[in-house]
Image: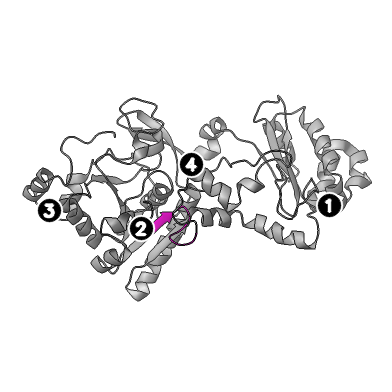
């Protein structure tokens, strides 16, 4: 069945998380993604390994639906294979350190000369220019320098990283948008182009509303924040909604670490919410009559809601509040999510067969296209498709493949976990 990205071939040199997130999404949508690995493989094949001699979940969960070829780019024959693949691919992706591809002889100018239609996509921590360009970056470094750390946590506590991998996976999603835009523009120009996403830049984009609040501070305090101490920058706000409506996580029975329901108190739902929680007395309480006064008394408001929630589980309270149209959602743990019927129905927790571990659960494709359904297939073993790609994609004969293998272009032996 033809899919949205059928006919698009991606040469994926990326490793760890940011780049593989992008290429896996493209593979889910139908692109032929060739994971181009050195003989040692993507480093995450062996990181956080839970079963000996089996590729780690870190690798398998980010590299489904791809093919793997192992090539030694330090050999002349290996460079020839890479050059030949560039000629038949639509996209090449890399996230090496600054200057690595140039030293190998494959900077953007050379790649563009080899294939003027190819899109070259690059992920860097801080971009290819500027004072920070040569700095190394990791997930939490990008969060720290992009504004996320400083605005995450409670006001009196230290800055915190988010649980969501906005530096890595967030950058991967941004990169896919850039690649697809470049492919679309190629339809009119006939030319490929260089696409770059810096992790710090992408974190800043995901923190956009915090920069909104930074500028609002020039004209006075931010009334929706439960704490009103400001020092010229957007503060940490705990679980405050940060929007026009009040919101917070309310502790529920039996009081475990994730027994909370996040509740948004919209203006038009307050009368029904007040009546359900505190009857006529709360509905008539002048301290909560409008959103402006509720903001001033929100500490009391949250305590009243928490007193009510102490008698209900988060699921029971969600049912109570949904019945009166109050926006709310339980704090769902990883255990909750992988066992949730809604999540399974949406195919966001899918069981994938795997030769080494039997099966594992992966996060499904969040992009749903009516004419491009996604079937998640296992991540490849290291070099599993080397001969297949050389023969089918490049048209190499068996004799040429064996000759190049003898010359050191790619390793001998059966495909295996790195």
Q: Quadrant of residue 278?
A: top right
By secondary structure, the bulk of the magenta-drawn segment is best described as: loop
Is residue 268 visible in the rendered image? The answer is: yes
Q: Is residue 312 above or below residue 167?
A: above
The label shown at residue 5 is 2
**Dot 4 or dot 1, earlier in sequence:** 1
Using the numbered discs, state the Cα–Cα distance from disc 3 to disc 4 in whole angstroms: 39 Å
Left or right: where 251 falls relative to 22: right
Numbered label tally: 4
x, y percent for residue 355: 29, 31
**Dot 3 or dot 4, earlier in sequence:** 4
In contact (CB < 8 Å): disc 3 and disc 2: no
- Frontmost of labels 4 and 1 is 1
The residue singled out by tag 1 in the image is: 291
The magenta segment: 122-131
The residue singled out by tag 3 in the image is: 396
Q: Quadrant of residue 414?
A: top left
x, y percent for residue 342: 55, 39
x, y percent for residue 15: 36, 45
């Amino acid at each position: 069945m033809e899919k949205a990205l059928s006919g698009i071939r991606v040469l994926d040199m990326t490793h760890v998380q940011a780049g593989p997130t992008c290429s896996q999404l493209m593979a889910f949508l139908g692109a032929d993604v060739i994971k181009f690995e050195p003989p040692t493989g993507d480093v995450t094949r062996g990181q956080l390994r839970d079963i000996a001699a089996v590729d780690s979940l870190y690798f398998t969960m980010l590299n489904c639906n791809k093919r793997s070829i192992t090539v030694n780019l330090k050999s002349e024959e290996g460079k020839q294979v890479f050059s030949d693949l560039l000629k038949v691919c639509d996209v090449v992706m890399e996230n090496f350190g600054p200057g690595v591809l140039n030293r190998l002889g494959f900077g953007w100018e050379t790649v563009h000369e080899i294939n003027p239609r190819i899109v070259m996509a690059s992920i860097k921590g801080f971009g290819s220019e500027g004072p920070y360009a040569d700095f190394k970056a990791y997930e939490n470094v990008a969060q720290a320098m992009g504004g996320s750390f400083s605005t995450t946590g409670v006001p009196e506590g230290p800055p915190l990283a988010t649980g969501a991998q906005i530096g890595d996976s967030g950058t991967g999603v941004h990169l896919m948008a850039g690649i697809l835009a470049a492919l679309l523009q190629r339809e009119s120009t006939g030319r490929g182009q260089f696409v770059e996403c810096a992790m710090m830049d992408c974190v800043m984009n995901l923190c956009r509303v915090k920069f909104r609040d930074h500028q609002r501070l020039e004209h006075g305090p931010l009334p929706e924040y439960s704490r009103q101490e400001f020092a010229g920058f957007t503060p940490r706000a705990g679980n405050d909604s940060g929007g026009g409506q009040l919101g917070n996580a309310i502790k529920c029975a039996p009081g475990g670490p994730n027994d909370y329901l996040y509740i948004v108190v919209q203006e038009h739902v307050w009368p029904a919410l007040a009546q359900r929680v505190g009857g006529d007395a709360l509905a008539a309480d002048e301290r909560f009559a409008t959103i402006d006064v509720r903001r001033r008394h929100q500490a009391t408001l949250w305590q009243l809601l928490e007193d009510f929630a102490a008698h209900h589980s988060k699921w029971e309270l969600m049912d109570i509040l949904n019945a009166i149209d109050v926006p709310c959602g339980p704090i769902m743990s990883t255990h909750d999510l992988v066992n949730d019927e809604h999540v399974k129905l949406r195919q966001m927790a899918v069981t994938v067969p795997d030769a080494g571990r039997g099966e594992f659960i992966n996060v499904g494709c969040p992009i749903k296209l009516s004419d491009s359904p996604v079937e998640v297939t296992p991540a490849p073993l290291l070099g599993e498709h080397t001969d297949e790609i050389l023969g089918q994609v490049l048209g190499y004969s068996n004799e040429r493949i064996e000759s190049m293998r003898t010359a050191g272009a790619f390793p001998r032996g059966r495909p295996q976990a790195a």
